[in-house]
Image (cartoon, rainbow, N blue to C red):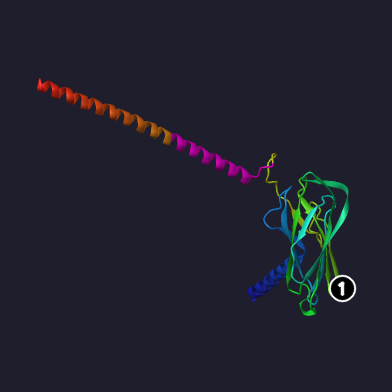
Amino acid sequence: MNVSRIALVGGVAASTVLILAGTASAHVSVQPQGEAAKGGYATINFKVPNEQDNASTTKLEVNFPTDHPLASVMPQPVPGWKIDVTRSKLAKPLDMHGQKINEAVSKVTWTAEGSKNSLGIRPGEFQQFPLSVGQLPEDADQLVFKAIQTYDNKDVVRWIEEQKEGAEEPESPAPVLKLTAATTDEHGSTADDKSGAATADEAKDKRTEAASASSSSDTTARVLGVVGIVIGIAGVAFGVLAGRRRTA
């Protein structure tokens, strides 16, 4: 009896932990497809789960960081959603590929459109919103985006709280994009470029070795041919002289 009660209590406790963990992790987040390398370009996805049981998410606003503005932002079309890209003038122009950029994207908004029965992100579902972004900063380890999620019952959830070092995760954390180390060296050559160059050099060396071997083989063949001819002539001359001696 006691064992059964302990097992029951343990099961309830475990279920409660799982439920709370699921609730805590169900927030708007951002992840790259592959890696988001410093100084490069990346495709990122904003993942938006629906946390309500009786309402659908019909709008998502993502505000871009002002301390590290992104000049190039291109959304991928999402069926059933209207996309608006807002650009703002920069206090300090950006230098991209030798050009001065005076504007950068400050906000991207997705708004659900369509019939009422298929409108937005329904309860128990999630949606991803892809963006191609760049050029990513070289002097930052992460980018913080502040998102606002709106439901069709007028509820609004602001995912705007930044994580403080050493503190617990806030109740409504802002999506954070982690940046990885740059993949290029100081001359702008990528690891793949270096690998390709090394492979090309190896192929060139092999071709040179093959050409040298072929040239050496040809030279040897020619020498042997000449030696054979000389030996043949000497043999004929020796035969003629021997015949003359026998005749005499």
Residue 135 percent across, percent down from the top left: 76, 50
Instruction: Magenta stretch: give its range.
Output: 188-213
Name the quadrant containing residue 30.
bottom right
Report the front residue among 188 and 247: 247
Considering the image in quadrants, where does the N terminus appear? bottom right
Q: Please tell me whether residue 179 is drawn above or below residue 9 in the rendered image.
A: above
Q: Name the residue beneath numbered marker 1.
A: 154
Tell me which secondary structure the magenta stretch mostly adopts: helix
Q: Please tell me whether residue 49 is drawn above or below residue 32 in the rendered image.
A: below
Name the quadrant containing residue 248.
top left
Report the front residue among 186 and 241: 241
Q: Give yes or no for residue 101 being in the magenta stretch.
A: no
Q: Give the number of callouts.
A: 1
Looking at numbered disc 1 in the image, what kind of residue is underneath it?
Lys
Left or right of residue 50: residue 220 = left
Report the front residue among 178 and 239: 239
Residue 58 percent across, percent down from the top left: 81, 71
Q: Residue at position x 72%, y 54% from top?
A: 42
Left or right of residue 201: residue 32 = right
Residue 8 percent across, percent down from the top left: 67, 74
Q: Residue at position x 46%, y 36% from top?
A: 211
Q: Residue at position x 68%, y 44% from top?
A: 184
Report the front residue among 103 and 181: 103
Name the quadrant containing residue 12.
bottom right
Question: Badge 1: few (under 14), some or many (20 or more) residues near its Cα, within 10 Å?
Answer: few
Residue 121 percent across, percent down from the top left: 76, 72
Left or right of residue 214: residue 165 = right
Left or right of residue 45: residue 207 = left
